[in-house]
Image (spheres, helix red, strand yellow):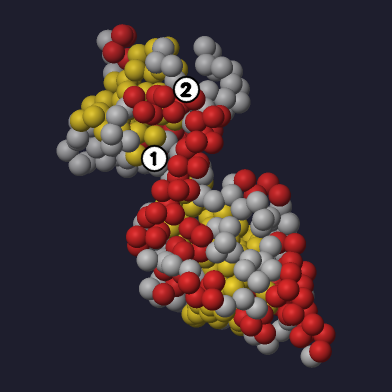
Amino acid sequence: MMKKILIILSVIFVSAGAITAQDQNLYSEIENGESVNIPGIYAKMETSEGLMIFYLDYINTPLATMNFIRLVEQGFYKDLEFYRDIENYAIFSGDPKNNGSSDAGYNYPMEINNNLKHDRKGILSMDGVSKLSSGSRFFISRSADSVLDDKYTAFGFLTEGEKVLNKLKRRDSIISIEIVRTGSDALAFKTDTMEFTRISQIVMEKGLESFRLENPLVVDAIEKLGTGVKKSLTGIYYITTLEGNGIKPEPEDVVSVNYNAMMIDGTVFDSSYNRGTPFDFTVGTKSVISGWDESVMDMSIGESRTVIIPPGLAYGSVQAGPIPPDSWLMFEIEFLGIK
């Protein structure tokens, strides 16, 4: 017991307001719920295999922490399953459909946490893609993988319950989650809608500035689309220029479209309009680039849309005719109908 007390005191003296990834080893012998006595915000997650306790890094990832707390307090995670289990790598939860296809119905800007890395077991991270975090899906690491650091927001780490994490498997469930705040800073941390919106804007602007420096032509093209531009969870920017009738295609439907295909600077390299013949293809069968499949399957008959597709959903890092490697592409698409 004396050793445990000394460990707790060491953490308090090292950092009363924030606990970094380097301090995680100080938790190695804390048991029986004692970690929540250290200043910070914690999530006590009761599962069908037992209790796990996570420290939430509200200092470096306030947005992800705020979002998680809000969902917990709404009872969102109660009775959800761990829908995916990658052996010795990670286990996933937070999907109301329990299959990885849905979340809370929104996404928000990703926060790259330079203090918390995926360098050990028990890192708590939000799922997501293309610099956007899922509204509710999260995963817990079971091994180190630095590749994840720039792809997902790590916002917490396991302080107790490693044996429970080892036992968890697909179809196990979350019975309940309780948020525990210890210390004045933790108690003062706001999670209301106004604060969530404010922090979201700050994180978004920071991300946009970084994106602008790396991709100035893409940012210019997005801005030229005007107001009303949206971004899909996969990273496609788009704006609807003409509404359709609401009828969308199903996978393996044969659809007919007209289009202009452009480099990101607006140079047209292909056009069905110029050929005078609409383009027909079968959606959802990988017969076109994945960014096209995703975009057209989200459109309805009669709709016109301008889309800006990232390289990973276009031709990637290979040369494709006149298209250089790693190119962002822009398309004006008119959905004519389903055959």
* Residue at image point 50% right, 79% down: 178
Q: Badge 2, how many Cα within 10 Å: few under 14, some, many 20+? A: some
Cβ atoms at labels 1 and 2 below 8 Å apart: no
Q: Quadrant of residue 42?
A: bottom right
Query: Residue visible at 28% across and 34% down?
Result: 227
Mark 1 secondary-structure assignment: strand
Residue drawn where x is 41% and y is 48% of the image: 201
Residue 164: give x, y in percent of width and height: 66, 77
Seen as rendered, the residue at the extreme bottom is 1
For marks 1 and 2 on the same chain, the one whose residue lies earlier in the sequence: 2
* Residue 272 visible in this rendered orientation of the protein: yes
Residue 24's place in the image compared with 331, above or below, is below
- Return the residue found at the far right: 3
Image coordinates of residue 335 in percent, x first then y, are 26, 29
Name the side, left or right, on which 57 lies relative to 130. right
Q: Nearer the viewer, mark 1 or mark 2?
A: 2
State which quarter of the image contains the C terminus.
top left
- Find residue 56 and report its image quarter: bottom right
Can you identify the residue that label 1 sits on?
231
Amino acid beneath label 1: Lys
| Residue 161 in the image, given as x and y percentages of width and height | 67, 78
Front in this rendered view, residue 44 or 243: 44
Residue nearest the viewer, comparing 59 with 52:
59
Q: Name the kind of residue labelled 2 in the image.
A: Leu
For residue 71, which quarter of the picture?
Answer: bottom left
Residue 217 disc label: 2
Identify the mark at residue 110; answer none if there is no mark: none
Query: Is disc 2 placed on a helix, strand or loop?
Result: helix
Residue 250: image location, x then y, percent: 32, 42
